[in-house]
Image (cartoon, grey):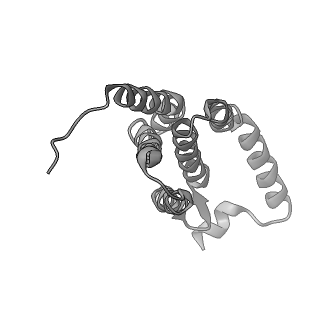
């Protein structure tokens, strides 16, 4: 059995890429934690780092990484599914679940050396999760007014 040897250059590359994946999702994780969501400051970075790490493992392996990528996408979907909660007729957490998927894609992009994709995904994910809240509230308010005008209040349906 051969003794383990460390490729210090590759070790630094791995540390650099995993750290970048971690940093890029921290704003979304922080915001999610601040909102009191079930996933937040720990889950987002862990998903991104794990995605990055799994794909970095392919660096020294010959073969097709598409099966690993498919498994990764499925697994992250399972984790994201845990963020979705049904409350009466309402379903909450779908945006958080989708954001978890984005965190995985960010980690994967960093691992594959596509930092441009990771930066765009991170910026748009943070923007979507934070800046679109006022738009969502406005649309919800308009929908409630229309339902009340038609005699179909969402709140009254939840109590039946």
Q: Residue at x 48, y 62 (%)?
A: 78
Residue 120 quadrant: top right
Residue 37 visible to an observer of this rendering: no
Residue 43 quadrant: top left
Q: Where is residue 109? Give x, y as percent.
A: 58, 40
Left or right: residue 124 versus residue 107 is right
Q: Where is residue 159? Give x, y as percent.
A: 58, 68
Q: Where is residue 53? Give x, y as percent.
A: 41, 43
Q: Where is residue 26? Give x, y as percent.
A: 48, 30
Q: Residue at x 71, y 36 (%)?
A: 132
Furthest toward the front, the residue is 2
Furthest toward the bottom, the residue is 160
**Split into 4 quadrants, where in the image is the C terminus?**
bottom right
> Which is nearer the eye, 116 or 27?
116
Left or right: residue 49 versus residue 149 is left
> Which is nearer the eye, 135 or 108?
108
Residue 80 visible to an observer of this rendering: yes
Examine the rendered structure and indicate whether residue 77 appears above or below residue 13: below
């Amino acid at each position: 059995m051969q003794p383990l040897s460390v490729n210090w250059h590759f070790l630094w590359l791995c540390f650099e890429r995993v750290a970048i994946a971690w940093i890029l999702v921290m704003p979304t994780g922080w915001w999610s934690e601040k909102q009191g969501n079930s996933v937040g400051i720990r889950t987002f970075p862990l998903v991104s780092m794990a995605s990055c790490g799994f794909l970095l493992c392919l660096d020294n392996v010959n073969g097709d990484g598409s099966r690993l990528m498919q498994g990764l996408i499925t697994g992250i979907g399972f984790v994201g599914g845990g963020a979705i909660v049904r409350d009466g007729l309402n379903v909450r957490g779908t945006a958080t679940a989708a954001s978890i998927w984005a965190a995985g894609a960010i980690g994967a992009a960093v691992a594959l050396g596509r930092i441009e994709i990771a930066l765009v995904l991170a910026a748009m994910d943070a923007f979507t999760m934070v800046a679109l809240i006022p738009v969502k509230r406005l649309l919800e308010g308009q929908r409630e007014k229309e339902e009340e005008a038609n005699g179909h209040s969402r709140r009254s349906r939840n109590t039946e």
